[in-house]
Amino acid sequence: MTRASGKYEMTGNSKFEVLHEFVEPARANLSPETWDYLMGGAETETSLNRNRMSIDALALRPRVLRNVEHVDLSGKFLGSSWRLPVLLAPIGSLQDMTKGGGKAPARAAAKFGVAHMLSSSCAPGLEEVAAAAPQHPKIFQIYVRGDAGWLDELVRRAIDHGYMAICFTVDLDTFGRRERDIAKRYLTTARRKASGEEHQARFCWGDVERIKKKFDIPLILKGIATPGDAARAAGMGIDAVYVSNHGGRQLDHVQGSTDVLPEIVEKIAGRAEIIVDGGYMRGSDIVKAI
């Protein structure tokens, strides 16, 4: 935006400039059931609220009289260059929320120059999403729904279709008790079709180590919420640790992601790259995390 004659003028042609301009039409376009699935958390939603509170509790201490005429926000993650230090987190059942499902954020990320992670519980499949943004580096996130052979085949498909990294979600041994959904008797498309949940329940460090040894592709673990697990992941050569409590949608009453982040950074000590999510909505939030 530019300032002229006491009024702000839009420099682009987008009708979406501030957060509420995204939120209000999104809510209007979704059913109440889908909206609550998207926005809700587990049980009392304490973890969900702590995510935001842990960010808001941090105060910025601005320094002045620095030359900031030219600012470069770009950076690298797992060897790829990005316009901003931002990753579009994986969202399951996007096909219930937007036309094209997982293809929409892939195209948006490619257009804007940020990273994108596709959820394995999102339609269409990884091949169609790869074709939607063929030149853009993408990450494939996996919920384990089969045995070792099933998992190896899925990882191989992702590699063959150009995904730059594999991410295992490790905080969903069982589905969280999301009371908004339970009260409405609501199940997403992906949840209705889900099978093989017992494989996720027994997925453990040895399975991660086996994949790490077998495939030449960076590995990310999503759902790390304690310094001890972060240190173990870094010690076994995991390329990136994804600090997350699943948006407060799995285990309630855990720490906010930003609260535990400094301890995890200290334990990792530069041995792995770090992603964090949970309540981040603005650039100032990202500054706090960094």
Image: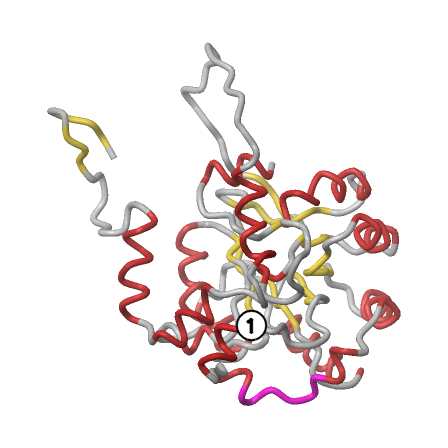
Relative to 60, is 118 above or below? below
| Camera-nearest residue between 241 and 156 | 241
Q: Is residue 146 magenta?
A: no
The residue labelled by disc 1 is 178
Q: Position of residue 62 (x, y in %)?
A: 50, 20
Q: Position of residue 161 (x, y in %)?
A: 59, 72
> Residue at coordinates 81% horizontally, 78% vertically from top-left?
202
Q: Position of residue 170 (x, y in %)?
A: 72, 67
**On the image, which quarter does residue 217 sit in?**
bottom right
| Camera-nearest residue between 148 and 33 | 33
Q: Is residue 117 left or right of residue 27?
A: right
- The quarter in which the C terminus is drawn is top right
What is the magenta range? 192-197
Q: Is residue 50 left or right of residue 132?
A: right
Tell which residue pokes out farthest to the top in this image. Answer: 65
Relative to 55, is 92 above or below? below
- The quarter in which the N terminus is drawn is top left
Q: Is residue 196 magenta?
A: yes
Relative to 269, is 274 above or below? below
Q: Amino acid at mark 1?
A: Arg
> Residue at coordinates 53% horizontally, 21% vertically from top-left?
61
Q: Position of residue 105 (x, y in %)?
A: 44, 63
> Residue at coordinates 11% horizontally, 24% vertically from top-left?
5
